[in-house]
Image: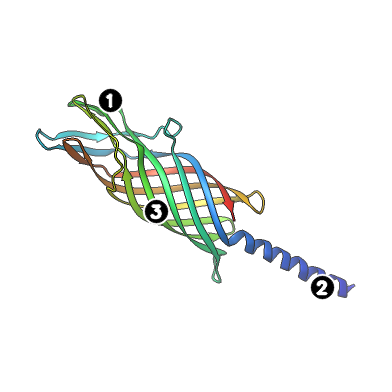
Amino acid sequence: MKKILIPAILAASFTQAASASQFNEGWEFSLGLGGAYSASEDITIKRDNASDIELGDVEFQNKPFQAPLYYTIRGGKWSLNNGWADSTAFEMELIHHKIYAKGSDLSQGVSKFEVTDGYNLLYVNYAVKKDHWIARVGIGAAIPHPDVIIDGERTHGGYQLAGITGQLSLEREFELNETFALGIESKVTYSYAYIDIDGGSFEIPNTAIHLVANLKYRL
């Protein structure tokens, strides 16, 4: 009996370890949908040939399911870890973040103040996985696309490499099969951008809390 049980136990252990190894290493890509809450910011628009516009404290909305959608795209390679973590990864991630200034906070000829074709955040992440929990830290670039109307003159278009950004993230992963998984992720981002518009410019820091559902594909 022992001669049968011992090989069976060893085989089961090997199969489980192999499955875990497959789950925790290799290339992984994900697409996420969700939304964000942005803190209010003090906004001043500097103009080249006119007085600066001080909007003061401006509240921002995200409107994640209004076109263009809020979304995230991420790709990276996981490697097994010999320490306390199951595996670690380096990743590239794009967050198509958006901000809409509340209309009631606009004045002095400013009728529209949005960064909605993207207050895009591009990150290089380092991620650590343990028991289906994933912690991330990332740093990268803010690439905004402004849409601003001042005194009837509109600035719309042109992606700008305009600043820096950082993030902290925690995700819970749920395996569906050997290829697909779901992830529920919360993250905090802080970004700073200096944006040029027709006839002026403005600084726009952004502190945001995000909640994202990810569909993940493993090669």
Residue 161, placed above or below residue 6: above
Residue in view at x 41 percent, y 32 percent: 63
Residue 132 placement, left or right of 49:
right
Position in image of residue 55 (x %, y %): 20, 33
Q: Which numbered disc, 3 or 1, marks the residue closer to the eye?
A: 3
**Residue type, mark 1 in image:** Ser
User: Mark 3 or mark 2, which is nearer the start of the sequence?
Assistant: 2
For label 3, the residue is 123
Under circle 2, the secondary element is helix
Q: Earlier in the sequence, mark 1 or mark 2?
A: 2
Mark 3 → mark 1, Cα distance in angstroms: 33 Å
> What numbered label is drawn on residue 178?
none
Mark 1 lies on a secondary structure that is helix
Please tell me in which quadrant of the rendered image residue 103 appears.
top left
With respect to residue 14, does 218 lie above or below? Answer: above
Q: Nearer the viewer, residue 56 or 123?
A: 123
Q: Position of residue 164 (x, y in %)?
A: 30, 52
The alpha-carbon separation of the residues under discs 1 and 2 comes to 73 Å
Q: Quadrant of the N terminus?
A: bottom right
Q: Say which mark, if any, is on residue 6.
A: 2
Q: Residues within 10 Å of mark 2 (few under 14, many from 20)?
A: few
Kindly check if marks 3 and 1 are in contact, taking CB atoms under 8 A apart as contact. no
Please state if 28 lies on the left or on the right of 7 as rendered.
left
Q: Amino acid at mark 2?
A: Ile
Label whose residue precedes the other's in the sequence (3 or 1): 1
Q: Give the residue pinned by disc 1.
A: 104
